[in-house]
Amino acid sequence: MINFFRSLRIDWILLASTVPLMIAGLLTMSSFSGQGAFAEKQIVWILVSLAVFFALSLVDFRFLRSTWAIMAVFLFGCFLLLAIFFLGKVSHGAQSWFSFGGFAFQPSDPMKLVTVLLLAKYFSRRHIEIANIRHIILSGAYSFIPFALIAIQPDFGSAMIIFFIWLGMVLVSGISKKHLLLVFSLGAIAFGVLWGFVFQDYQRARIMTFLHPTEDRRGAGYNIDQSMVAVGSGQVLGKGLGQGTQSRLNFLPEYQTDFVFAAFAEEWGFIGVLLVFLFFGILLWRILANSLLGETNFETLYGAGLAIYFMAHFAVNVGMNIGLLPVTGITLPFLSYGGSHLLTEFAGLGILMGMRRYSRAAHRNDTKNEFWQVLAG
């Protein structure tokens, strides 16, 4: 049995770091089970996602180094994003779900992972030439396709995650300061275009609420206001399991998804939040540690992109829960209720474990040093 587990080449510390996060989410959902069987359904999703994780860990992903393979995956993901405009279900004002009876699937979640793979493939051969602005433009063009398809659903939160993945992987690959300034200038222009022609009224209201959170507490600012109240009322030790009044009395909306962090913080307090940050930090550490053992730059860049994907989700969700960012509907990895994002997260980790099977004992020193120098700024 021991030899069998060793043969899996799983990073057990990485996998173990996700367990407390999932338990934290389940405990928060079960506290308010009278309002819906979220915890019971989430357990099913966890079991399915773990099965996907172990299945993918057995796959040799060197075939993804081929341009035709990664482009086929990318084009299929774009096809799903297009199909959703004809077959998708409208939920919370966005047409971003496929619904099959009692099962719903959001293609924008796996598309984030596909974007990581595509950019890892692109930069794996061109990271030395990243100073050439042509590669920044071309990689941006690839990323803009899913960004635009997701933004017009409209799902601005997921579209921004695509942007953060691209920006983060460009930075990891190496970019000159003048080109970085150009990127932010183009981003400002793109934001102006989105504000004028793409954003819906409620999305503009969320951003204005972010800038002036106290002006409309009963309207657009209600969610942020209730979330901040929930987080603050947890104080140091929290109110206790099942004692979160903001969630239990329905003051806090979407406590099981978008605002699960606020609901958890209210019950478990500052100490519980520190533990969530600790285990999430361990997860990121193990992702980056495994990426540095990649056989080629493709595996290393994939691991870096996966870490960026998780960091973007975590930072945006926590930021909007404590009033630092506008509400965007972004889930908190491993804690929020839902199958699409959980499957994507474990699929991403499973692919990393599959790459670990043929990893080096020690990565090339020059690539390793360059990688950490870029991360250190």
Image (cartoon, grey):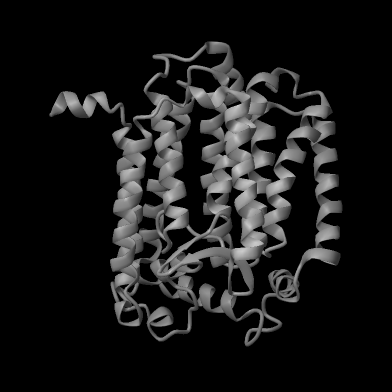
How many badges with numbers are in the image? 0
Left or right of 198 on screen, residue 249: left
Left or right of 320 on screen, residue 339: left
Left or right of 316 on screen, residue 188: right
111 in relation to 331, above or below: above
3 in relation to 195, above or below: above
The residue positioned 72% from the left and 39% from the top of the image is 142
- Percent across and percent down for residue 237 are 33, 67
Say which quarter of the image contains residue 40.
bottom left
193 in relation to 17, above or below: below
- Percent across and percent down for residue 62 are 49, 22
The residue positioned 59% from the left and 32% from the top of the image is 70
Say which quarter of the image contains residue 361.
top left
User: Of 48 and 294, which appears nearest the observer?
Assistant: 48
| Quadrant, the N terminus | top left
User: Of 199 and 68, which appears nearest the observer?
Assistant: 68
- Percent across and percent down for residue 133 are 83, 29
- Whether residue 323 is visible, yes or no, is yes
- Whether residue 324 is visible, yes or no, is no
The residue positioned 78% from the left and 33% from the top of the image is 138
- Percent across and percent down for residue 351 are 44, 34
User: Of 317 and 129, which appears nearest the observer?
Assistant: 129
Farthest left residue in view: 1
| Quadrant, the C terminus | top right
